[in-house]
Amino acid sequence: MYLLDSNIPLELFLEQARANEVEEFFRVIPTKNFSVTEFSLYSICLTLVYRKRTNAVQNFLKDILKQDGISLIRLSVSELEKVFENVTRFNLDFDDAYQYTAAEKYDLHIVSFDTDFDTTPRGRMTPQQVLKTITKQT
């Protein structure tokens, strides 16, 4: 199971350099294997609305979250203490520490283009790395 960092769907929606990699990732890996934090969901929505991409937001909410079964996960307010511990422990900013803490709680692999996760015990995988892992297993 995989925790999608907000930069993964944003790469696709904003048609950035690795959009094709993300598109293939979403095409090959069943969405039931994906989770996204509520924090990331709001970050994605804020970014897309700011960039006048409201259709992309609506499609993301409708297609991916409602129909395709991506799990929406969150941390409780009491779990924010662990987020701040991870900020200090791994020198992460708040959003990365939130993602890391959620991945720990739900035992998920982080999928991200953000190299800040590389200094943590859980690390991270890019979509391409996940695809290579899946290919080796079949």
Image (cartoon, rainbow, N blue to C red):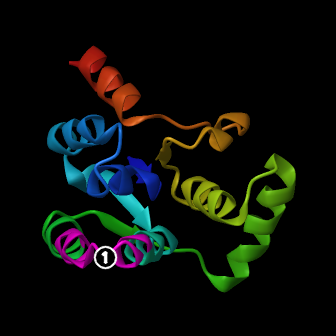
Q: Residue 123: x percent and y percent? A: 61, 36
Task: Return the residue found at the far right.
Answer: 88
Identified at 21% across, 42% down, the residue is 23
> On the picture, is 83 further left or further right than 2?
right
Identified at 51% across, 73% down, the residue is 39
Number of disc labels: 1
> On the picture, is 52 further left or further right than 30?
right
> On the picture, is 101 further left or further right than 74?
right
Task: Return the residue found at the far top.
Answer: 136
Secondary structure state at the residue bearing disc 1 = loop
Q: Residue 98: x percent and y percent? A: 63, 64
> On the picture, is 121 further left or further right than 102?
right
Q: Compare residues 106 and 91 and report the one nearer the observer.
A: 91
Q: Name which quarter of the figure residue 71 lies in.
A: bottom left
Identified at 67% across, 42% down, the residue is 116
Which stretch is magenta?
A: 47-60
Q: Compare residues 60 and 36 and report the one nearer the observer.
A: 60
Q: Residue 58: x percent and y percent? A: 20, 78
Check the picture and name the quadrant holding the C terminus: top left
Residue annotated with mark 1: 52
In this view, 73 is above or below 33: below
Q: Residue 120: x percent and y percent? A: 71, 39
Identified at 29% across, 42% down, the residue is 19
Question: Residue 10 colored magenta?
Answer: no
In this view, 93 is above or below 65: above
Q: Please rate how many residues cluster around mark 1, counting C-alpha atoms within 10 Å: few if below 14, some from 14 to 19, many from 20.
A: few
Identified by mark 1, the residue type is Lys
In this view, 45 is above or below 127: below
